Structures are given as structure tokens and as C-alpha cells.
Amino acid sequence: MDSDVTILDVLRKQGMQTVAQLSDVLSVTGTAVRQRLTRLLAEGYIERTAVRPERGRPFHQYALTTKGRRRSGQNFADLAIALWDEIRAIEDPDVRQGLMQRVSRRLAEMYTDQVQGQDMTQRLNALTDLFADRRLPINVDSSGELPVLNVEACPYPEIADHDRSVCSMEKMLFSEILGESVRLAECRLDGACNCTFEVTSDSAKTPTENQLPIL
């Protein structure tokens, strides 16, 4: 929610804040602030510290957690574009591909502990929750033989508009996170409604879809 991001941004810029301070900055009631803070506390984006002054009533101050700092600091499109341009400038295709693979693997390492599950369906659901938390809408279509990821909004539109090879890195990222081969089946740059990634490994099938051994 935009209101939640606004609170995170205030805490990032100004440090610890009380309900009264946030209410004043945001020009909303204390009740509205508390509702948002309660939600952000539950999601692990902020932490609360009790303050007991020598005089007066105790009160709470709120600050960002590491998770909150990551979410509130996501507006670095210029930096991402500059870094991507440097990757594109590498003339050797093998070196360029290897660097993209290493970047994808490093990103996957950051997310792997949040994408857990005993089967592919559970991991896919965890993946959608992970990216929904980052305001990237993804849904899973399990109606076919193998599951499909539908990415409804490009995470790097400024880059993709000029260089569609970034789609390859996104495919690598999903493959690394899920531990299965992933294929880009449809792309928004080709006029599709969504970018569609198909999990191609047979191990991604549900138990009922896999052929049972003949005894």
C-alpha cells in the first residue's frame, strides 16, 4: 500500500519516530498511523522500542528493520540502468553471460530462504508472496501439465524498453530460486499481456501428474 511505503520512507529519512510525530508529518490521525504501524510491525518492516522517561508517561518509538530498509530503498532506477549498461558494454558474450548468471545467483541467494516448500506448488506460492511484498504482481497458473508464472508488471521497465536481454536474467533468477529450469514463453515486449515463464522440468509436476512406476 502506498500509505505504508510513505511511512517507511519517513522512517528511512528521519529515523525513529513516535505516533505523534508521524501523525504530524503525514497529516493523518493517530489512529490511522497506529493501524498502519500495526500492519508494518506484523510484516517485519519496522520495530518498536519502549521509552520510559523520568517524567511523563512511557511511549513507543518506531524504526525500520533491515527488511524495511530494503523495501524503502527500492527507487534506484538510474543506478540499475547504469549498471546494466556496463554489463551490455562487455564485448565477449561468454563473459557477459557469465556475469548475468552470477548476478542472478547472488539475487537468488538473498531470496532462497524465503521461497521454501516441499513441492513446486508450495515454492511457487512462496515466490508470488515474496514478489508481492515487493509490489511486483505475479500469479501462478497450474491448470496445465506444468505450472506457469505470469508476471503482470515488468520489474525493470526502463531497462527492458531498450534491451530485452534483461528478460534472460529474470529467467535465470526464477530458475535459481525455484531450483528448476524455467522458459520464457511469452513477453510483454512482443505484445503479450504478461511475461509468462514456464517451469519446464518434469519434477515440477504434481505427484498425480507424474507417471507411477509399474510394479
Image: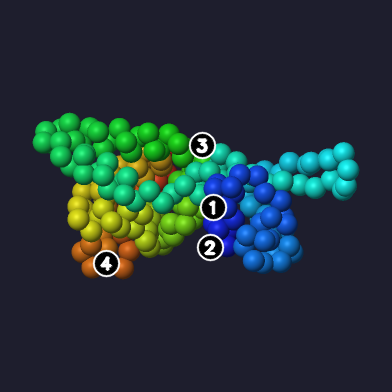
Q: Residue at x 54, y 57 (%)?
A: 5
The residue that mark 1 highlights is: 9
Label 3 or label 2, whichever lies nearer to me, is 2
Whole-percent x, y for residue 97 in the image? 20, 36
What amino acid does circle 2 point to? Asp
Which quadrant would the C terminus be assigned to in this image?
A: top left
- Residue at left offset 69%, top offset 55%: 21
Q: Residue at x 31, y 49 (%)?
A: 78
**Label 3 – label 1 distance at C-alpha:** 26 Å
Among the two numbered marks 2 and 1 on one chain, the one whose residue lies closer to the N terminus: 2
Numbered disc total: 4
SS type, badge 4:
loop
Q: Which mark is residue 192?
A: 4
Tag 4 and tag 2, C-beta contact below 8 Å: no
Task: From the image, tell me which residue sits under label 2.
Answer: 2
- Residue picked out by circle 3: 113
The amino acid at mark 3 is Asp
| Mark closer to the observer (1, 4) | 1
Q: Are marks 3 and 1 in contact (CB under 8 Å)?
A: no
Around disc 4, counting alpha carbons within 10 Å, would you say few (fewer than 14), some (14 to 19), or many (20 or more)?
Answer: few
Q: Earlier in the sequence, mark 3 or mark 4?
A: 3
User: Disc 2 on helix, strand or loop?
Assistant: helix
Give the mark nearer the N terminus: 1 vs 4: 1
Q: Earlier in the sequence, mark 3 or mark 1?
A: 1
- Vertical comparison of 65 with 206: above or below: above
In this view, the residue in front, 87 or 128, is 87
